[in-house]
Amino acid sequence: MSPFNSSDEVRGEQYLAQLQEVMAISGAKKVNVIGHSHGAHAVRYAASVIPDQVGSVLTFGGANQGVPWWPPM
């Protein structure tokens, strides 16, 4: 993915193309996707475009307003 493009949609489309290529080569019908930092947005975008082909989405360290996980509340 383009490291300098700030658009989630542009990077998401780049990730989606890579993901579909890997799925075609491997024959996988579903994938689990993981995104870190700015990649968190890309995997969520891709999962929203092909939801039936994504088994799970894991993101960490993304630039979104999540909830703190430590210490437990």
Image (tube, rainbow, N blue to C red):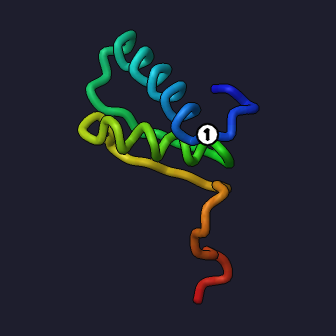
Name the amino acid, label 1: Ser
Residue farthest along the bottom direction in this orientation: 73
Residue plotted at (60% across, 84% down) = 72
In front of the other: 71 or 50: 50
Q: Please report the residue visible at 61 percent of the width from the left and 39 percent of the height from the top.
A: 7
Find residue 39 and report its image quarter.
Answer: top right
Residue 71 screen position, x and y as percent: 67, 82
- Check disc 1 and report the residue beneath it: 7
Q: Quadrant of the N terminus?
A: top right
Q: Nearer the viewer, residue 63 or 24?
A: 63
Q: Is mark 1 on a helix, strand or loop?
A: loop
Q: Judge whether 46 appears above or below 63 on screen.
A: above
Q: x%, y% of residue 59?
A: 55, 52
Residue at 26% x, 26% y: name it: 29
> Is 28 rendered above or below residue 37?
above
Percent of width and height locating residue 58: 49, 50
Q: Residues within 10 Å of mark 1 (few under 14, many from 20)?
A: few
**Residue 27's image quarter?**
top left
